[in-house]
Image (spheres, grey):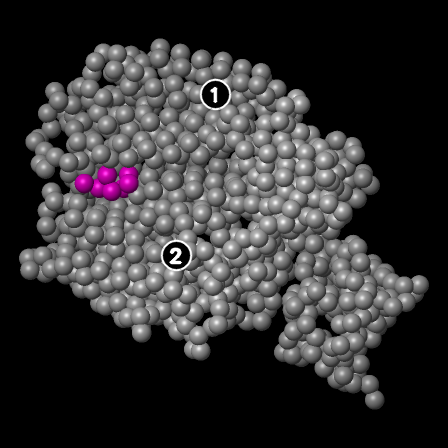
C-alpha cells in the first residue's frame, strides 16, 4: 500500500511541477498576477509530495520491504541501518529521486529566500525550475520508478553493492548532487533574465549568492568523492580522469568561471552575455553528466547500469532544455550592450582571462572525454584517452591561469592601478620561488621543473592573497566578508596547487609481499606484518591484518587493513589502513593471500595529501563567507555612490 | 563498480558479469624486476596501459587475471631487451590502440592533441580583442564600479 | 556575422547532441574491443592437448583447413551459457572446433566437459595465458574462425548465440563444412 502511495505522490508532484511551470512562465508572460501568485503554492505542494515520496522510500528500506523492486535490488536483511538509508541513492532510480528532491529543496529555498525579487521575475525563475522538475519527474515515472513492485516479494534482498558500503556513501552523493542541482538555480535566473528581456546589475547581485552556494557544494562534493575513492578503492588513487569524474569536474570549472563573471556583471555591468552563456553551459554540463552516467555511452567504473532507452530520454530532455535556452540566448543576448571600459591591467581584464582559460580547460576535458565516442562515430578504430592525455593538456591552460591569479587579485576595477602593487607582487613571487625551490631541493631531493613551478605558483598565490587583507587590517580599514571570502578561497587554491605538486611528484608506492614478522621498506618507512586474523562483520567476513609501521627503529603506528568478503553479492572490498603523520599519509592495503600466512600488499607514502582535502574546504569556506556578505541582504540599493565604493576593493 | 544490470542483451550481460571479477584485491602485484631501470620503465608502462577487461583501470590497478598475465608478459619483454615502443606495438597489434591510455601521436589523432593548444590560441585571441575594444572606451566611460 | 556569433553556442550544442545520439546507438558495443587481428594471419600458436600433454596442436599443423578456435574456462559463467550452442554447432557441422582451455585447472576442465558434454574436436590448454595474450584475448569466451590460409576471418567477442553461429560462422564456411559429416 505504502509504495503505491509513494508512486502516487510522485504523480501529484509531476502535476504540481507542471502547474508551477505553467503559472510561473505563462503568468509572467501574460501579466496574470493571480497565476504569478499561485506559483509559490505550486512549489509548496510539489515539495510536500516529493518529500512524502522520499520518506516512503526510506521507510521501505528501513523496514526491509522487499516487495519493492528497488529495495530488493539494493538492500538486505543484514545491511546496517546507515546503509539501508543511504542505499536510497545507491543505484539509478533512487539517485534520480534524490535529484528531484534536491531540486525541490532548492526551489523552495529560492521561493522563500528572495523577498527583494520583483514578483514577475521570481515567477519566471520558479517556472523554469518547475519545467526542470517536470522533466525529471516524467523521466522517473516513465522509465525509472523506484516504487515498482516485485511480485511475489523477494525473501531477501541482493544487498547494496559492497563498494558502496562505507560511510562515504552517506555524504558524497547528496553533497555532490546538491551542487549539480544548485546550478539549475543559476540557469533559471539566466532564463528569467532572457525571458524578461533585460539583465542589470541588480540581477547579478541576486544571482551571485545562489551560484556561489551551488559552487561551494559542488567543490565539497567532488572533494568528498575524491577522498572517498582514495581510501576505499584500495589502490590509493584519488583522481583518474574517469569519464564520470570529468562529468562532475566540467560543471565545476564552468561554475568557477560563472561566479567570477557574475562579479564583473554586478560591479560594472559588463560580460552580460558571457555570464548568461556560462550559466546555461554550467547547467547543461550538469545534465550531460547525468546522461553520461546512465546511458552506457562511455565506459566507467562509476556508471550506473547502462540502458540506452534511458539515455535517449535524457538526451531528448537535454536537447530540449538546453536547445531552448540557447535559442533564447541567440535571440536576447545581442540586446545586452554596455559601453563600460577598462584597461589592460584592470581586474576585468584578469577575470576575462580567468573565464577564457577555465572554459578552454573545460573544453579540453570535454574533448578528451568524448574523443572515444567521436572516433567511434567517425568509423575510426578505437581511440582511448586517459590521464597521460589529460594531465599535460589540462596544465596547459591552468598554469597561465594560476600565474594570472597571483597578480590579478591586486588589480583594481576599471583602472588596474597595478603600479602601486608591483613591489608586493614581485616580492611575493621571489619569496615563493625561494621557498618553493628550497622545499623541492631540500625536503624532497630536487627533481622536475614542474615540481618547482607548482610549489612556486602555490606559494605565490597564497602570499598574494594575504597581502590585501593584511594591508587592510594594518590600516584599520573595513574587511568585508566578500573580500575576506575571496582571500580565503584563493588561499585554498594555492593550498591545492601545493598539495597536488607534493603528492604527484613525491608519492612512493610499492607492492610488497610479506609473511608473518617480515618487513619491507617503502619510502623510508618499515612495514612489518605482525599477523592476520579473521573477523566477522554484520554482513561480511573479513581478514584483518596487523601491520606495524616504524621509521628508524621507532614504532609510529599500527594499521589494520582489511579484506572484506560480503556474503550476499560474494564480492570483496578492501579497507585500507591509513595513518596521517604531519600531512603525509602512510597507506597500506591488502592484496592477495599468497598462502602460508603471506600476503601481498600495496604500500604508499603520500606527502602533503592532507592539504589536498583541506584546500577545497578552504575554497568552499571562502565561498560561504563571500555569499553571506551584507550587500546581498540589503532590500534596496541606492544609486551607486563612488565614495562608498572607494573604501572597498571587492 | 557498476551494479549488475538486469534486462540487457546477452552479450552485454555477459561482459558485465565479467566486470564482477574486477574487484581490487588482485591488483596488488609484488613481482619486481631486479634491474631498477627496467623496474622504473615497468612501473610507468603498467600505469599507461589500460586493462582490457576492467577497462577503466590501468594494468597497475586492475585485478583481472588478464591484467596479471599482461604485466607478466611486459616484464618478460622488458627482460628480453624490448623497447617501450616495441612492447606497446605488440600490445596494440593484439588489442588495438584502446589499450593505450595515451593516444598515439599520429595524423589520425592530430585533432585530439592539437585541440587544447588551438582552443587556447582562440581563447587568447578573443580575450585580447575584447580587451582592446574596452580599453579604447575607458576614457569616455564615466561609470564607476558599484 | 555580428549577430550570427550568438548562434554559435546553439550550433556547437546541436553537433554535440548529434554525436551523443549516435554514440547511444553504438553503446551496445562500447567496451568491446574490435580486434586488430581480424583479416590478418593468426599469430603462430602451439599448445599441449588437455589430456595428452605430450602431444601438441598448433596453427602450422592446421594450415590447409578451416577451424574454429574457442577460448573458454570452467570458471566462466558466459561460457556455460554459450556451451549448448557449441554442442549444437558440433552436431550440425563438420568444421573442426578447437577448444582452448584458458587459465583453468585440468580436473575442473575435465569435469566440465564430462558433465556438460564436449563440443570440441580437440581441446588444448593454455595454463600460463601467454597464447591467449598473443591472440589478443581479453576475456572469455572469445571465438575465432580461421581459414585454410591461416587468416582470421572473424572473431566473436563474448558468447556465441545461435544467430551468431548461423550468420557469422556458417555464413563464412564453405558449404560442405556447414553440414554435418555424412
The answer to whether residue B74 is seen in the rendering is no
Frontmost residue, A268 versus A605: A605
Q: Based on the displayed image, in which of its 4 quarters is residue A635 positioned?
A: top left
Q: Based on the displayed image, in which of its 4 quarters is residue C40 positioned?
A: bottom right
Residue beneath disc 2: A85
Residue A189 screen position, x and y as percent: 22, 47
Residue shown at the point (92%, 65%) measured from the top left: C55
Residue A53 screen position, x and y as percent: 29, 63
| Residue contact at pointers 2 and 1, CB within 8 angstroms | no
Frontmost residue, A327 versus B60: B60
Measure the alpha-carbon separation of dots 2 and 1: 45 Å
Residue shown at the point (31%, 31%) measured from the top left: A622
The residue tagged with tag 1: helix, strand or loop?
helix
Q: In this view, does A517 lie to the left or right of A355?
A: right
Q: Is residue A539 left or right of residue C55?
A: left
Q: Give the range drawn in magenta.
A: A206-213
Q: Mark 2 lies on which chain?
A: A
Name the residue at the bottom extreme. C182
Total numbered labels? 2
Q: Please state, as top left, top right, bottom left or bottom right, where the N terminus of chain C lies in the image.
A: top left
The answer to whether residue A649 is seen in the rendering is yes
Respond whether the residues carrying marks 2 and 1 are from the same subunit. Answer: yes
Vertical placement of A603 versus B93: above or below?
A: above
Residue A179 screen position, x and y as percent: 34, 46
Q: Is residue B13 left or right of residue A643?
A: right
Q: Is residue A511 left or right of residue A276?
A: right
Specify few, some or many for label 2: CA neighbours under 10 Å numbering under 14, 14-19, or 20 or more: some
Q: Nearer the viewer, mark 2 or mark 1?
A: 2
2 or 1: tag closer to the N-terminus = 2
User: Residue A215, which numbered label?
Assistant: none
Specify few, some or many for label 1: CA neighbours under 10 Å numbering under 14, 14-19, or 20 or more: many
Q: Mark 1 lies on which chain?
A: A
Amino acid at each position: 500500500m505504502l509504495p503505491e502511495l509513494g508512486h502516487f505522490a510522485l504523480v501529484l508532484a509531476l502535476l504540481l511541477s507542471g502547474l508551477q511551470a505553467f503559472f510561473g512562465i505563462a503568468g509572467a508572460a501574460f501579466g496574470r498576477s493571480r497565476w504569478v501568485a499561485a506559483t509559490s503554492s505550486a512549489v509548496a505542494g510539489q515539495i510536500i509530495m516529493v518529500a512524502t515520496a522520499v520518506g516512503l522510500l526510506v521507510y521501505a528500506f528501513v523496514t526491509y520491504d522487499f516487495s519493492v523492486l528497488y529495495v530488493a535490488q539494493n538492500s538486505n536483511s543484514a545491511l546496517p541501518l546507515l546503509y539501508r538509508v543511504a542505499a536510497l541513492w545507491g543505484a539509478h532510480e533512487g539517485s534520480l529521486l534524490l535529484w528531484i528532491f534536491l531540486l525541490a529543496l532548492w526551489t523552495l529555498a529560492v521561493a522563500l529566500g528572495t523577498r527583494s525579487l520583483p514578483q514577475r521575475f521570481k515567477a519566471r525563475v520558479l517556472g523554469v525550475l518547475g519545467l526542470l522538475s517536470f522533466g525529471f519527474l516524467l523521466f522517473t515515472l516513465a522509465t525509472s520508478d523506484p516504487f515498482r513492485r516485485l511480485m511475489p516479494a523477494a525473501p531477501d534482498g541482493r544487498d547494496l553493492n559492497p563498494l558502496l558500503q562505507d560511510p562515504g556513501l552517506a555524504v558524497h552523493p547528496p553533497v555532490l548532487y546538491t551542487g549539480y542541482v544548485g546550478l539549475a538555480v543559476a540557469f533559471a535566473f539566466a532564463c528569467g533574465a532572457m525571458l524578461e528581456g533585460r539583465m542589470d546589475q541588480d540581477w547579478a547581485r541576486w544571482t551571485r549568492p545562489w551560484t556561489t552556494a551551488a559552487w561551494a557544494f559542488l567543490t565539497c562534493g567532488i572533494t568528498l568523492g575524491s577522498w572517498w575513492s582514495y581510501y576505499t578503492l584500495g589502490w590509493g588513487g584519488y583522481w583518474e580522469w574517469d569519464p564520470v569524474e570529468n562529468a562532475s569536474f566540467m560543471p565545476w570549472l564552468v561554475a568557477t568561471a560563472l561566479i567570477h563573471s557574475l562579479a564583473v556583471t554586478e560591479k560594472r555591468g559588463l560580460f552580460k552575455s558571457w555570464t548568461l552563456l556560462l550559466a546555461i553551459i554550467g547547467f547543461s554540463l550538469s545534465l550531460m553528466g547525468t546522461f553520461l552516467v546512465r546511458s552506457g555511452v562511455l565506459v566507467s567504473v562509476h556508471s550506473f547500469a547502462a540502458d540506452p532507452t534511458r539515455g535517449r530520454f535524457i538526451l531528448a530532455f537535454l536537447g530540449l532544455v538546453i536547445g531552448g535556452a540557447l535559442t533564447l540566448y541567440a535571440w536576447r543576448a545581442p540586446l545586452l550592450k554596455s559601453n563600460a571600459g577598462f584597461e589592460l591591467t584592470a581586474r576585468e581584464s584578469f577575470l576575462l582571462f580567468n573565464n577564457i582559460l577555465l572554459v578552454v580547460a573545460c573544453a579540453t576535458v570535454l574533448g578528451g572525454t568524448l574523443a572515444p565516442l567521436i572516433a567511434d562515430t567517425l568509423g575510426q578504430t578505437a581511440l582511448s584517452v586517459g590521464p597521460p592525455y589529460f594531465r599535460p593538456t589540462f596544465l596547459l591552460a591552468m598554469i597561465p591561469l594560476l600565474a594570472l591569479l597571483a597578480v590579478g587579485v591586486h588589480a583594481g576595477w576599471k583602472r588596474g592601478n597595478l603600479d602601486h602593487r608591483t613591489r608586493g607582487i614581485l616580492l611575493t613571487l621571489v619569496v615563493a620561488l625561494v621557498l618553493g625551490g628550497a622545499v623541492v631541493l631540500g625536503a624532497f631531493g630536487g627533481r622536475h621543473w614542474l615540481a618547482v613551478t607548482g610549489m612556486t605558483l602555490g606559494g605565490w598565490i597564497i602570499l598574494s592573497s594575504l597581502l590585501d587583507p593584511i594591508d587592510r587590517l594594518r590600516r584599520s580599514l573595513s574587511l568585508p566578508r566578500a573580500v575576506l571570502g575571496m582571500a580565503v578561497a584563493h588561499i585554498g587554491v594555492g593550498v591545492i596547487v601545493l598539495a597536488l605538486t607534493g603528492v604527484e611528484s613525491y608519492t612512493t608506492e610499492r607492492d610488497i609481499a610479506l609473511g608473518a614478522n617480515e618487513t619491507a621498506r617503502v619510502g623510508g618507512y618499515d612495514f612489518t606484518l605482525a599477523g592476520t586474523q579473521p573477523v566477522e562483520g554484520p554482513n561480511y567476513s573479513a581478514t584483518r591484518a596487523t601491520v606495524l609501521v616504524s621509521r628508524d627503529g621507532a614504532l609510529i603506528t599500527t594499521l589494520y587493513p582489511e579484506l572484506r568478503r560480503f556474503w550476499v553479492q560474494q564480492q570483496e572490498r578492501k579497507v585500507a589502513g591509513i595513518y596521517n603523520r604531519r600531512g603525509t599519509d602512510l597507506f597500506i592495503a591488502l592484496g592477495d593471500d599468497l598462502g602460508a600466512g603471506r600476503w601481498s600488499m600495496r604500500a604508499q607514502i603520500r606527502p602533503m595529501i592532507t592539504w589536498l582535502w583541506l584546500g577545497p574546504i578552504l575554497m568552499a569556506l571562502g565561498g560561504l563567507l563571500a555569499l553571506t556578505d551584507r550587500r546581498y541582504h540589503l532590500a534596496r540599493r541606492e544609486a551607486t555612490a563612488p565614495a562608498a565604493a572607494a573604501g572597498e576593493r571587492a | 563498480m557498476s551494479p549488475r544490470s538486469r534486462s540487457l542483451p546477452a552479450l552485454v550481460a555477459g561482459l558485465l558479469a565479467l566486470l564482477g571479477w574486477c574487484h581490487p584485491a588482485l591488483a596488488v602485484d609484488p613481482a619486481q624486476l631486479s634491474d631498477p631501470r627496467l623496474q622504473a620503465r615497468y612501473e610507468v608502462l603498467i600505469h599507461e596501459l589500460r586493462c582490457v577487461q576492467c577497462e577503466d583501470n590501468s594494468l597497475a590497478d586492475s585485478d583481472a587475471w588478464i591484467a596479471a598475465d599482461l604485466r607478466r608478459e611486459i616484464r618478460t619483454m622488458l627482460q628480453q631487451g624490448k623497447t617501450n615502443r616495441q612492447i606497446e606495438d605488440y600490445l596494440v597489434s593484439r588489442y588495438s590502440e584502446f589499450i593505450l591510455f595515451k593516444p598515439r601521436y599520429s595524423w589520425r589523432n592530430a585533432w585530439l592533441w592539437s585541440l587544447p593548444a588551438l582552443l587556447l590560441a582562440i581563447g587568447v585571441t578573443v580575450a585580447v580583442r575584447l580587451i582592446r575594444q574596452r580599453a579604447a572606451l575607458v576614457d569616455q566611460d564615466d561609470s564607476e564600479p558599484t | 556575422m555580428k549577430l550570427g556569433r550568438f548562434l554559435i553556442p546553439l550550433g556547437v550544442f546541436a553537433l554535440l547532441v548529434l554525436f551523443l545520439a549516435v554514440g547511444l546507438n553504438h553503446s551496445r558495443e562500447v567496451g568491446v574491443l574490435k580486434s586488430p587481428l581480424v583479416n590478418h594471419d593468426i599469430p603462430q600458436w602451439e599448445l599441449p592437448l588437455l589430456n595428452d600433454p605430450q602431444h601438441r596442436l598448433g596453427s602450422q599443423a592446421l594450415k590447409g583447413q578451416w577451424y574454429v578456435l574457442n577460448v573458454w574456462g570452467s570458471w566462466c559463467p558466459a561460457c556455460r551459457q554459450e556451451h549448448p550452442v557449441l554442442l549444437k554447432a558440433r552436431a550440425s557441422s563438420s568444421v573442426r572446433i578447437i577448444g582452448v582451455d584458458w587459465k583453468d585447472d585440468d580436473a575442473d576442465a575435465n569435469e566440465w566437459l564430462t558433465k556438460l558434454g564436449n563440443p570440441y574436436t580437440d581441446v588444448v590448454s593454455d595454463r600460463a595465458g601467454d597464447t591467449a595474450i598473443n591472440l589478443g584475448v581479453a576475456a572469455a569466451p572469445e571465438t575465432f574462425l580461421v581459414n585454410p590460409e591461416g587468416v582470421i576471418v572473424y572473431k566473436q567477442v563474448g558468447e556465441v548465440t545461435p544467430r551468431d553461429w548461423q550468420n557469422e560462422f556458417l555464413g563464412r564456411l564453405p558449404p560442405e563444412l556447414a553440414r554435418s559429416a555424412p
